[in-house]
């Protein structure tokens, strides 16, 4: 019994390592591919949308395949060429919509938080098998082999339901794609953060103001402030790389503009908290800029 538990632990560790190795390989390719590749990844992450793109695309795929499967079932009891044509068309729509959905999923998987790596790999595997079966089903439909087509779609539905369950677990239990923190609303009034003499040129400083971690950064006579926690998965931004008025998260390489916290590059689809700053009586004071 003890031996079985050890084997299960080893298998789990190996699966996590495999998942993270795949994720790191994809992420490295994106980072090494230059600005164009990075912008494509941003598009797939959904940085332009303000929240992850992948769940939006999955709605189209799951909807088309689910309704198509329903019409397949109807066709078993009511022999109708029209019903079969509707089912075939919906399955094909799902197949086409699955392609950008898979790409967006790969983009998100490339920066998956470590605790969710196992489940994310299982989610991707189940959905990939389901997609392959739906493609096989479409080929059978085109050949007129109705029995094989419905068998493939039925089996695909089992894998896709499993994948959908795991996707829900990633979002609701593991918080993947969910903003790491609630919108910050304090302090609304000017509040002291740090003595101005204690922050040097191009030196990041993390301070707590009204119970919130704030990143201060001095460039010349200007001191900028944004939230010190990355909205993607909680990375410490004060430990990131600073260049061109931006900070790059040390965990998954999201880039934020220090002037207003906006996302310059994903994977984060959420902006960092934005603070106004001023120096008064030798103290750096900050107040939060309300989220519009």
Image (spheres, helix red, strand yellow):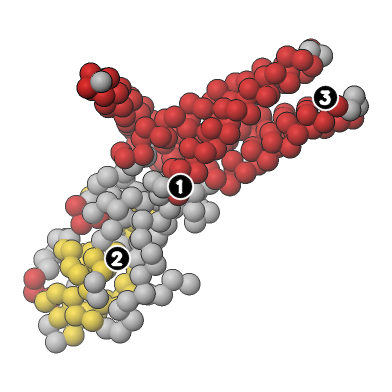
Residue plotted at (12% across, 68% down) = 199
* Disc 1 versus disc 2: nearer the observer: 1
Residues 139 and 260: in front is 139
234 relative to 273, above or below: above
Residues 192 and 164: in front is 164
Q: Is residue 101 left or right of residue 120?
A: right
Mark 2 crowdedness (10 Å alpha carbons): few <14, some 14-19, many ≥20: many
Q: Which numbered tag is attached to residue 68?
A: none
Mark 3 and mark 2 in contact (Cβ < 8 Å)?
A: no
Residues 283 and 74: in front is 74
Q: Earlier in the sequence, mark 1 or mark 2?
A: 1
Residue plotted at (23% across, 50% down) = 241
| Whether residue 96 can be seen here | yes
Q: Earlier in the sequence, mark 2 or mark 3?
A: 3
256 relative to 130, above or below: below
Mark 3 crowdedness (10 Å alpha carbons): few <14, some 14-19, many ≥20: few
Which residue in the protein does label 1 denote? 171
Q: Residue 116, percent across and down?
A: 36, 39
Quarter of the N terminus within the rendering: top left
Which residue in the protein does label 3 denote? 76
Give me the C-alpha separation between circle 1 and circle 3. 36 Å
User: Which image quadrant is residue 151 in?
Assistant: top right
Q: Is residue 71 left or right of residue 136?
A: right
7 relative to 245, above or below: above
């Amino acid at each position: 019994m003890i031996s079985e538990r050890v084997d299960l632990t080893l298998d789990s560790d190996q699966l996590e390592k495999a998942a993270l190795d795949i994720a790191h390989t994809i992420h490295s390719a994106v980072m090494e591919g230059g600005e164009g590749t990075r912008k494509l990844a941003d598009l797939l992450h959904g940085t332009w949308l303000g929240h992850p793109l992948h769940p939006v695309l999955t709605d189209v795929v799951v909807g088309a395949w689910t309704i198509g499967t329903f019409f397949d079932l109807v066709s078993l009891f009511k022999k109708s060429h029209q019903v079969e044509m509707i089912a075939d068309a919906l399955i094909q729509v799902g197949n086409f919509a699955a392609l950008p959905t898979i790409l967006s999923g790969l983009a998100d998987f490339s920066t998956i938080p470590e605790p969710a790596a196992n489940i994310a790999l299982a989610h991707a595997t189940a959905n990939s098998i389901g997609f392959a079966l739906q493609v096989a089903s479409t080929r059978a439909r085109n050949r007129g082999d109705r029995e094989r087509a419905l068998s493939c779609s039925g089996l695909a539905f089992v894998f896709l339901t499993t994948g959908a369950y795991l996707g829900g677990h990633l979002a609701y239990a593991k918080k993947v794609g969910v903003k790491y923190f609630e919108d910050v609303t304090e302090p609304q009034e000017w509040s002291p953060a740090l003595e101005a003499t204690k922050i040097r040129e191009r030196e990041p400083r993390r301070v707590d103001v009204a119970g919130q971690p704030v990143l201060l950064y001095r460039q010349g006579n200007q001191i900028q402030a944004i939230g010190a926690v990355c909205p993607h998965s909680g990375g410490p931004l004060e430990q990131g790389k600073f260049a061109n008025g931006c900070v790059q998260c040390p965990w998954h390489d999201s880039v934020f503009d220090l002037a207003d916290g906006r996302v310059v590059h994903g994977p984060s689809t959420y902006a960092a908290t934005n603070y106004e700053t001023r120096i008064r009586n030798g103290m750096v004071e900050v107040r939060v800029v309300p989220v519009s």
